[in-house]
Image (tube, rainbow, N blue to C red):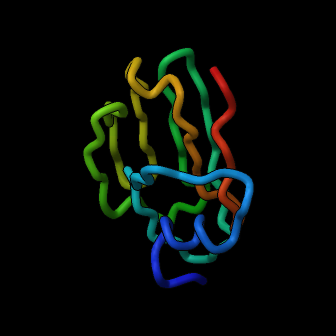
Amino acid sequence: MFHNGLSEALEYFQNRKRFSQVEIIGFQDLQSAVDEVALSRGPDSFSIQLSNDNDSFTRIEPSDCLETMTQTRTLLVVHIKPCAADVDLFFFDKGRMIRLPDR
């Protein structure tokens, strides 16, 4: 685990792209770093369902370009606003940061 934060981890451990801004919209409380999630993607939304019932979303942060539509302990549904058209979105799955597939 890298404890300094996501922005610093992206800066230190990848060299492909520089980020001008990093936002975290959802925090997951995981039982294991390799727990899985199920991703569903729509044209202007996505949902993340935590596969382990003991995992949970513990905190959701507001974002100008992403609107939380639904939040339960194990489900997060997010509407992608037009201002997020040129941003990269990532989610945590099986111990890795995965880029959200394009619309």
Position of residue 77 measured from the top left corner of the image (x, y, whole percent): 42, 35
The image shows residue 34, relative to residue 65, as above or below, that is below
Of the 4 image quadrants, the one containing the N terminus is: bottom right
The residue at 59%/53% (across/down) is: 18
The image shows residue 49, relative to residue 8, as above or below, that is above
Position of residue 67 measured from the top left corner of the image (x, y, whole percent): 31, 32
Of the 4 image quadrants, the one containing the C terminus is: top right
Image quarter for residue 10?
A: bottom right
The residue at 35%/31% (across/down) is: 65
Image quarter for residue 29?
A: bottom left
Left or right: 63, with 29 as reference point:
left
Left or right: 33, with 6 as reference point:
right
The image shows residue 48, relative to residue 65, as above or below, that is below
The image shows residue 33, relative to residue 90, as above or below, that is below
Q: Nearer the viewer, residue 95 or 32?
A: 95
Position of residue 91 measured from the top left corner of the image (x, y, whole percent): 58, 51
The residue at 37%/50% (across/down) is: 25
Q: Nearer the viewer, residue 67 or 7?
A: 7
The residue at 50%/67% (across/down) is: 6
Image quarter for residue 95?
A: bottom right
